[in-house]
Amino acid sequence: MSITPDSIREKLASSDFGDRLTAVNQMRELEPAIAFDLLSIASADDNARVRYAAISQISTVGSVDKATSTKLLRNRLTTDPEPDVQAAAADSIGALQLTEIFEDLKSVYENTTEWLVKFSIIAALGELGDIRAFELLQDALGSPNELIRTAAIGALGELGEDRAIKLLLPYVTHPDWQTRHRVVQALSNFTDETARQALQQLTQDKSEMVAKAAEIHLAST
């Protein structure tokens, strides 16, 4: 049976959430504008798994109607009862670079107790590239959650604000090699001599992966 907008609409109207979830996955076969209209419907589904799948997929087609995407993703970010869906909304906001939602991201980050939502917001702020995020990312470096701290390191690098370099330098000698690897990626976004010197230091890192990553960046600049 061929996949058509009508066949997907039929599945979206099913009482079986499995059918509705299948419908969302099948939307990948449609033209972006048609898929977006159907994803907008699925994003308000009663089942959290269906909403999550729809919101996640909007990251790839939401640019066809950014005004509607902004409204829809803001709503899911701020009102959805499921942290997974809120996190997916943050991911899509970052992917679509919807800077209009920055204040909502900030508010949810400051008020939620869900680490996954916090993590996704910090990661999204890097993609967003909005300088207003600097203080929030600085605060996230002090998070007790290691994954959030690591996401903040990456996001500060993506933001590319030179003030971030002094915040990143203490992590050059962090005991966890994965954190140091993320520092290499972050510092690679800067042309400042201080960042270059830190990368030079990291070429001597005891982790081969970290040292190699630093060498590759320095060789390409």
Image (cartoon, rainbow, N blue to C red):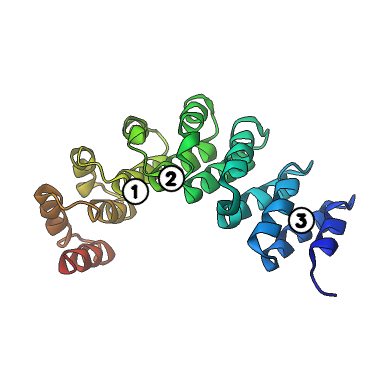
Callout 1 secondary element: helix
Of the numbered discs in the image, which one, if any, rests on residue 21? Answer: 3
Query: On the rendered structure, is 6 left or right of 182?
Result: right
Residue at image location 63% in from the left, 34% down from the top: 75
Viewer-nearest residue: 201 or 35: 35
Tell me the quarter of the picture where residue 73 sits. Answer: top right
The amino acid on which the numbered mark 1 sits, given as a three-letter code, is Gly
Query: On the rendered structure, is 64 left or right of 103?
Result: right
Of the numbered discs in the image, which one, if any, rests on residue 143? Answer: none
Q: Position of residue 59 (x, y in %)?
A: 56, 53
- How many C-alpha atoms fall within 10 Å of the one at disc 3: few (<14), some, or many (≥20)? many
Residue assigned mark 1: 154
On the question of residue 137 being in view, the answer is: no
Residue at image location 77% in from the left, 44% down from the top: 47
Residue 81 vertical placement versus 123 (above, below): above
Callout 3 secondary element: helix
Tell me the quarter of the picture where residue 162 sits. Answer: top left
